[in-house]
Image (cartoon, rainbow, N blue to C red):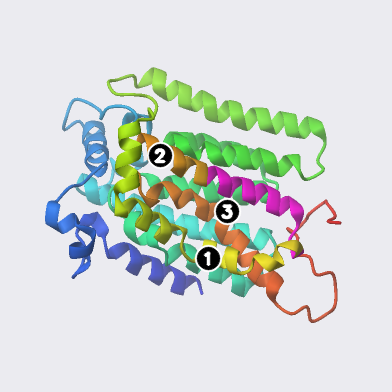
């Protein structure tokens, strides 16, 4: 199964590698036609600056996302290729982390494999995975953080959220969701306070230090704009890419929603919160950036586990035991 997932990922990520779309794909994506690298040009510039071939880092907020460029800069490839090699390795790691997360949540091996396949053979992995952006590593770190918190590896969560802060600021979503997870486990309040503060301070301090150390031109935040909101609202690409990004996992959650009552309510609350925050990020991006489905990619961290566990809950209960699908090691009972 592992070799199948690796092979599938390599095929999916090869289709748009370096924005050199294979075959007729370019006529659909437009990349081959207009040659516009988008934000990738700024991350290429970041790698070049780290290598010393140019003098200046890209403007904010791109300069505040150093992790992928730092990993790409030492590689013996031209900058775009180096970034995308990092992205492929990151997505391999994200697939492994998804497997761990699903198994920790109680999914069977077969359904955990199906969930990993949903992540690998998906529109965002194909469309955004190897085009020179930093999102793949950010998504991987979010999945890894959720796997660690579900497994009870609190120190590991702390390390991951610091790395996530170095990758992309929108990964703050997973800090909130991780705190919500331990808040609903019945663990002592002092542990909630200790780890909630540690993760929050670690993330926020890292973000602050990056901004202090790498001050430069550009804006630190997305500024809402009515013009951008109207532009996004009129762009078919905005809504088509969003629908394609939601994809199979969200479709399965909707289709299997009659079985939501069989899932642990803690899981529904926490992973539902993660999904809602992901949608909120996309909604904000509609007003403050040239938005597309890439801003919805974080929802896979939460929708894939929900889809897998709903598929499992929908299966016939052969042994007539309790019909609840609860996370492994759950300390809470569901009424």
Q: Residue at x 28, y 48 (%)?
A: 132
Eyeballing the image, is 203 above or below 239?
A: above
Earlier residue among tags 3 and 2: 2
Residue 290 visible from this viewpoint: no
Q: Is residue 64 magenta?
A: no
Earlier in the chain: of badge 3 and badge 1, it is 1
- Residue in the image at 81% along x and 40% along y: 187
Residue at which label 1 appears:
251
Q: What residue does disc 2 label?
A: 285
Q: CA distance from mark 3 to mark 2?
A: 19 Å
Q: Main secondary structure of the magenta part?
A: helix
Q: Is residue 121 left or right of residue 31?
A: right
Nearer to us: label 3 or label 2: 2
- Residue 302, disc: 3
Quick check: marks 2 and 1 in contact, CB under 8 Å? no
Check the image and report above or below for 315 versus 30: below
Q: Secondary structure at mark 3?
A: helix
Mark earlier in primary sequence (2, 1): 1
Tell me the magenta residue range: 262-278
């Amino acid at each position: 199964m592992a070799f199948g997932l690796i092979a599938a990922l390599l095929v999916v990520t090869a289709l748009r590698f370096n924005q050199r779309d294979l075959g007729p794909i370019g006529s659909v994506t437009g990349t081959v036609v207009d040659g516009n690298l988008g934000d990738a040009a700024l991350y290429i510039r970041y790698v070049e600056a780290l290598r010393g071939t140019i003098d200046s880092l890209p403007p904010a907020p791109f300069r505040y996302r150093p992790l992928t460029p730092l990993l790409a800069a030492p590689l013996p490839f031209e900058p775009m290729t180096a970034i995308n090699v990092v992205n492929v390795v990151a997505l391999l790691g994200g697939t492994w982390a998804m497997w761990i997360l699903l198994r920790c949540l109680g999914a069977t091996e077969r359904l955990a494999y199906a969930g990993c396949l949903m992540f690998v053979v998906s529109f965002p992995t194909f469309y955004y995975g190897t085009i020179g952006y930093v999102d793949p590593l950010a998504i991987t770190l979010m999945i890894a953080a959720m796997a660690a918190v579900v497994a009870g590896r609190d120190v590991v969560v702390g390390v991951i959220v610091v790395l996530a802060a170095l990758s992309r600021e929108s990964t703050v979503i997973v800090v909130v969701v991780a705190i919500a997870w331990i808040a609903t486990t019945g663990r002592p309040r002092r542990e909630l306070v200790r780890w909630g503060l540690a993760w929050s301070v670690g993330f926020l301090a890292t973000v602050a230090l990056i901004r202090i150390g790498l001050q430069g031109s550009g804006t630190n935040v997305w500024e809402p704009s009515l013009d951008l909101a109207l532009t996004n609202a009129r762009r078919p690409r905005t809504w088509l890419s969003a629908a394609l990004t939601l994809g199979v996992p969200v479709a399965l959650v909707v289709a299997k929603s009659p079985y939501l009552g069989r899932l642990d309510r803690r899981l529904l609350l926490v992973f539902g919160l993660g999904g809602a925050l992901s949608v909120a990020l996309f909604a904000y991006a509609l007003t403050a950036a040239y938005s597309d489905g890439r801003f919805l990619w974080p929802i896979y961290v939460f929708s894939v586990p929900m889809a897998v566990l709903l598929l499992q809950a929908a299966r016939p209960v052969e042994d007539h035991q309790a019909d609840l699908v609860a996370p492994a090691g759950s300390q809470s009972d569901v009424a």
